[in-house]
Image (tube, rainbow, N blue to C red):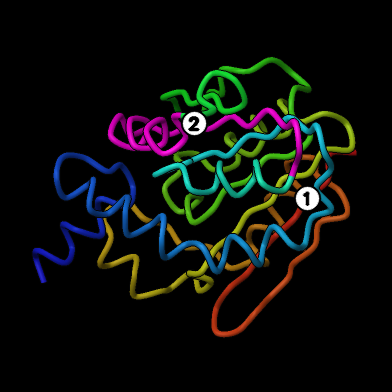
């Protein structure tokens, strides 16, 4: 159990050899959730997009495929994640894909920069989640969307006892927090077994 706990705690901030293994695992295993969630958004060509908690960089690739001539930014708190995301996107790095180390609490981008912000399997680890949501709202353009994709949808999930530093939220909790942060027309989408996508609009 100790090894399993150590492995999955690497989800929050992948480090070292175990972290690199976790990033490979996440790139693969998050694909079904991400592909389903992104289909719910009418992504346009030429958008400027941010993926927060970009992990191993696979979501950056998926976003790029959906928006021709897009500029896709990724940010992650983990140095290991940033290195992996850069490696995975090396052909378009600093041309169409831009990867930075940093926190959702203090996004290093100007107001109103992004058409779309995504967060795949990551809000569980954001400190002061309401403050982070305010930051996302700040960096979105008017009319821009924030898309949260999660698999753990019960606030009392057993995963919170396995993964250190994890807080699980119900989709309804996330919708309420998005509304409180100033998002409008917030939608909850569900897909079995436990996938949920919560979308908020900056009015």
Q: Which residue is mark 1?
A: 200
Whole-percent x, y for residue 169 in the image? 53, 63
- Residue 116 relative to residue 72: left or right: right
User: Considering only order in the chain, which callout, 2 or 1, is on the residue closer to the N terminus?
Assistant: 2
Per the image, is 186 magenta?
no
12 lies above or below 190: above
Is 199 or 174 nearer to us in this picture?
199
Give the distance between the C-alpha atoms of the residues marked 1 and 2, in whole angstroms: 20 Å
Q: Count residues near mark 1 (Cα–Cα under 10 Å), then give few for <14, some for 14-19, many for 20+.
A: many
Q: Nearer the viewer, residue 40 or 4?
A: 40
Which x, y percent locates residue 24? 31, 53
Q: Residue at x 46, y 42 (%)?
A: 57
The quarter holding residue 189 reads bottom right
Circles 1 and 2 in contact, beta carbons < 8 Å: no
Nearer the observer: mark 1 or 2; the answer is 2
Which mark is on residue 75? 2
Q: Identify the element where label 2 is drawn.
A: strand
Which residue is rendered at x = 79% and y = 55% of the image? 41
| Highlighted magenta segment, given as a residue range | 67-90
Expressed as whole percent of the image width and height from the top left, the position of residue 55 reads 41, 43
Q: Is residue 17 above or below residue 191?
A: above
Give the residue furthest to the left.
Answer: 2
Most distant residue in the bottom direction? 193
* Residue appearing at x 67%, y 51% in the figure: 177
């Amino acid at each position: 159990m100790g090894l399993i706990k150590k492995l999955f705690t690497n989800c929050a901030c992948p480090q070292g050899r175990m972290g690199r293994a976790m990033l490979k695992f996440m790139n693969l295993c998050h694909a079904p959730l991400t592909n389903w969630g992104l289909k719910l958004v009418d992504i346009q060509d030429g958008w400027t997009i941010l993926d927060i908690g970009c992990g191993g960089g696979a979501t950056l690739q998926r976003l790029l495929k959906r928006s021709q001539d897009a500029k896709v930014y990724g940010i992650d708190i983990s140095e290991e994640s940033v290195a992996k995301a850069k490696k995975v996107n090396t052909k378009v790095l600093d041309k169409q894909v831009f990867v930075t180390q940093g926190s959702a609490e203090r996004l290093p981008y100007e107001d109103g920069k992004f058409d779309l912000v995504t967060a795949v399997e990551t809000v569980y680890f954001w400190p002061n989640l309401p403050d982070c949501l305010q930051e996302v709202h700040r960096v979105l353009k008017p009319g821009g969307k924030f898309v949260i994709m999660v698999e753990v949808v019960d606030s009392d999930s057993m995963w919170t006892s396995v993964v250190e530093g994890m807080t699980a939220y119900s989709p309804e909790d996330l919708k309420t927090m998005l509304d409180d942060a100033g998002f409008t027309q917030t939608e909850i989408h569900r897909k079995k077994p436990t996938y949920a996508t919560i979308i908020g609009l900056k009015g």
